[in-house]
Structures are given as C-alpha cells and as structure tokens.
Amino acid sequence: MLRTEEITLNMGPQHPSTHGVFHVVLKMDHEVITEARPICGYLHRGIEKLAEARTYTQFIPYTDRLDYLAAMLNNTGYVQAVEKLMEIEVPERAEYIRVICCELSRIASHLIAVGTYSVDIGGITGFMYCLRDRERIMDLFEMVCGSRLTLSYMRIGGVAEDLPDEFIPALCQFLDEMPSRLDEYDGLITGNEIFQARTKHVGLLDPGVAINYGISGPNLRASGVFWDLRKNRPYSVYDRFDFEVPLGKRGDCFDRFTCRIKEMRQSLKIIRQAVEQLPEGPVMAKVPKVLKPPAGDVYHEIEGAKGILGYYVVSDGSNKPYRIHVRRPSFINLGFLNELCKGWKIADVVAILGSLDIVLGEVDC
Amino acid sequence: MPGSSIPSTVIDGLKDKFPAIEVSENLTITVPEAELLSFMRELRDNPDYDFNFLTNLTAVDYPDNFTVIYNLVSFKYGYTLMAKVNLGKDEPAVSSLTSLWGSADWQEREVYDLFGIIFTGRHNLTRILLEDGFAGYPLRKDFQWVGGRE
C-alpha cells in the first residue's frame, strides 16, 4: 500500500495572488485543503497607535493608507465620525461632492478587484483593460486634489477645495463611456468559459454563516443578503438617489465577482444623479481652526468598497484623539478564509482568496 | 450622537431581565463582566431584537480601567447597539463571544494582541498582527515607543 501523509505548503508572504504581503499555511491531503491558516501582520504599521500622537486633521492622511485602493471612502468614514462627534453640519454641495468622489473610488476599487481576479484565474488581458479605465479615475482625482492614490481630499466639515471647472465635463465623458467598457469586461472576463469553470460553484458561502462571521460588502450580498448601508441606514445624501443593490444567488466566487461588476453600474447611476442635482454653495462648514471635540465616543459606519467600514473615535476633550479604532472590512472578511477553503482543491484557494477582494493595507492596519 | 438606535421599550425590557446593566444618556449599555455572556446570548437569540451581526469589537485603555466595546446590528429590525464592559487594570479578562458570533474570533485576537486583554473560554488566543515574541501591548497607554511627535 502507498504511504500517504499530510503536506504543508506556504503560500506567501511573497506570492502575487495574495495581493500583498500575506501568508497562508496550507495543509493538504493530496490536493484537498484540510486547513488554510492565514498569517497576517506583515504590513502592520500601528496606525491606531500613531493616531494618538496626531491631531484630528493630521490623521486623515493615515486613513488613505488603510485601503489605498479606495482612499476617498476611507477619508469619508473618518471625517464623518468626527463630524458626528462634534455635531458639525456639512454643506450640501460638499455632501454631493463626497458622494461623487466616494462612488468613483468604489468603481476604482472594484476595477482592481475585477482585474486582479482575472489575473488570478489566468487572464492577463482583463487586468490591462481594467487598469486602463481605472487610470481615468486617477486622472479625475488628480484634477480634484492633485493626488492620484493617497488623496486626503476630505476635511472635517467638508472637502478641501471646490471642484475645478474642467472636472464635470471630464466626469460626464467618463460616465458616458464607462457602461460600454463594463460590457467589454462582461464579454472578456465574465463570459469566458474557463473563467466560469474556475469560479462557478466554488467557495460557497452560506448567508447565515456569512452574517455570523461578520462578512460584509459584495461578499455578503453575493450570498443573497440584502445589506448595504447606503440603503439600509442611509448616511450623507444617499437617500436621495435611485439605485439598486445587486445580489447574488449561490454565494460562490462567480457571484462575488459579478456583484462587483453590477455594483459599478449602480455607482455610475448614483454619480450621474449626483452631478444633475449638484447644488451651488460653500464646500466647507464653519469649523474652528483647532478641533477639540467634546469628551465622549462615537462609532460610525459607512459602506466601503470592501464592506462595512467603521470608525470608533474616543475624545478626551483635547486636540488629539484618545483612541481611534477602525473596523476594517478586509480584516474581518478574511477571518473566515480557513473555513471557506476547507475541502476545496489547492487551485481553488487562489480563486477563493481573490474573490474576497482583500487589501493588505487594511487587513494589517 | 446616540451610541445605539433601539426603541426605549426594548431597553426597558432588557433592564427588567438584567437589573445590573447601566444605560447611559446616549443609550450605551454597560454590562457587568459576569453577565456578559448571558446578556449577549439574550440579544442574539431573542427574536424581538435578533442581533445577528457583531460588527465591531474593540477596547480602550482608560486611566482607571480597560473598556471592551461591542457594536451589534440587527439585520431584521435595523437596530444598532453599543455595549461596554469595564475591566480592572490588573490582568484584565473577559468572557469570549466566539461561541455566539464567529466575527468575534479575529477581533478578540486583535484586542488581545494590542491590549493584552484575555478572552476566556475560547481556543487559539494568539497574537494576530504582531509577531509571537513581541514584548508588551502597544495600544496600552503606558507602552513606550519611539516616533511620536512630542
């Protein structure tokens, strides 16, 4: 009789499919995964500790470096938490500008998710096409705030500056062209036979289990759970827009992927409405130069690109936060990886991990 | 800014069942450590509130005590609830909620890693972000570090 034994294989920390410095220790019986133990922390910078030695405004650039693929959303979650704590009312124009920028950020993040997922499954071309369109969003952000990746555009009380004149025409052109680009992805990636064979019915996530494990965002909605904070607990001005929340049926890798493609279409719809309704007026509320929120704490959540993004801010009445904690969706979504990989083949691990769309800056914080 | 958004009738019902809990002005509920597990089980299992989603779990190091913070959400009713447990400064320990919510697993490990708070009644309470041999708990206020801006 042939002797068999369990094999241990290290995936990462240097591995292109882990989307950053992330390490999974795989235990396998032949090709079947019996345990996938995630090891994170390679990118831990102690951002929550650093916050305690910064002022409230100085912390904004650090939020960019959490989920660096969707910096606008990270900025927004944080400044809204502080605004809630200080009871600052943000001018309406600033709210609309925030919505436009946040949804652009969501599209940019989903484009990376979709593109890198295509590479993970073996289609390099899809990645190139996605980056081509993400580049245009980067250009739009450059117009708005001068930066392309780490934007720091949001301020406590509004946004840093009003939109430049050339922004709206460039944005409208992007909005006009993007739907046909999404059709292109559907043809190039979604409709690809190999892609479907690798992702359909793979890595099934039960809705009840997903809720129990705190999984959120497109990963949760792909399992058919209707939970999108823009709809369920509208913040900012999201209650004024007409859009749908795409849901999946099976909760497999394919559903998680297609949810993101569909969400991009909805984001385009939101941006178009925001541009139409965009009011005139100031973009910054009257806030004191030195911010000293009253002693107390606040927890605020927004719908980030990867899931529910929450900020817990504690103030002791001074100009520096006593404590800031970030509920990072990628970190919590990753907590279920072991259970999700068990019983699948080694080739499926890449498909499953890619479908969760994690970003390590956010996992490790 | 309220810590929770739940009807006052629900709060009153909880007070009747758990007389030891304290409800602050902004609807944050402080639970004695001994009752935490039964209180949380009630929140999760009672169909009147149905708090099925433990969204956030973290801690704060205050001068006199550690506080562990739990943020719960009920998908069915849209309620949110913030609960707190105060722990002593010496060898802080609190019951683990991993038996109720899977999302507690990694978040408790993170709090253990950065604060040194022990979660009892669970397995695999190990560091998650820092390396295993790391000395100290960085998010404690008495942690000595370089790179500040003083």
Image (tube, coloured by chain):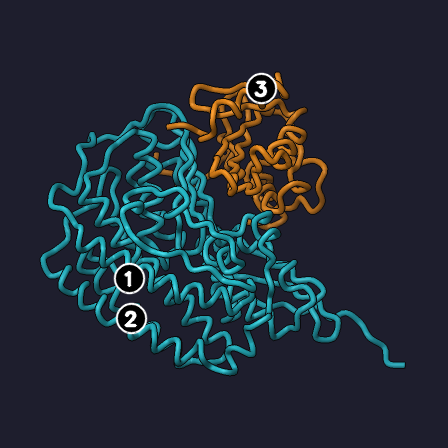
Chain colours: A cyan, B orange
Q: Residue B136's spot in the image, x, y percent? A: 58, 38
Quadrant assignment, res A287 = top left
Q: Are marks 2 and 3 on the same chain?
A: no
Q: Position of residue A71 (x, y in %)?
A: 33, 54
Position of B79 relative to A101 (above/below)? above
Q: Residue at x 29, y 70 (%)?
A: A179
In front here: A29 or A53? Answer: A29
Q: Are marks 1 and 2 in contact (CB under 8 Å)?
A: yes
Front residue of this view, candidates B7 and A100: B7
Looking at the picture, how far across and down is residue A329, in whole percent?
47, 51
Q: What's the chain of the residue with tag 1?
A: A
Closest to the observer: B124 or A265? Answer: A265
- Dot 2 amino acid type: Pro
How far apart, in angstroms, are the residues tagged by discs 1 and 2?
8 Å
Real-space CA distance between mark 2 and mark 3, rounded to the nearest whole angstrom: 53 Å
Q: Residue at x 50, y 66 (%)?
A: A255
x 39%, y 39%: residue: A51
* Secondary structure state at the residue bearing disc 2: helix
Quick one: label 1, few (<14), some, or many (20+) residues within 10 Å?
A: many
Is residue A217 something one can see in this rendering? yes
Give amino acid for label 3. Lys
Q: Is A302 situated above or below A244?
A: above
- Label 3 sits on residue: B15
- Name the spot of residue B2 as percent of width and height, x first: 41, 27
Tag 3's secondary structure?
helix
Q: Residue furthest left?
A: A165
What's the chain of the residue with tag 3?
A: B
Which chain does the residue under circle 2 lie in? A
| Residue type beneath disc 1 | Leu
What residue does disc 2 label?
Answer: A179
Residue on which disc 1 sits: A268
Q: Residues within 10 Å of mark 2 (few under 14, many from 20)?
A: some
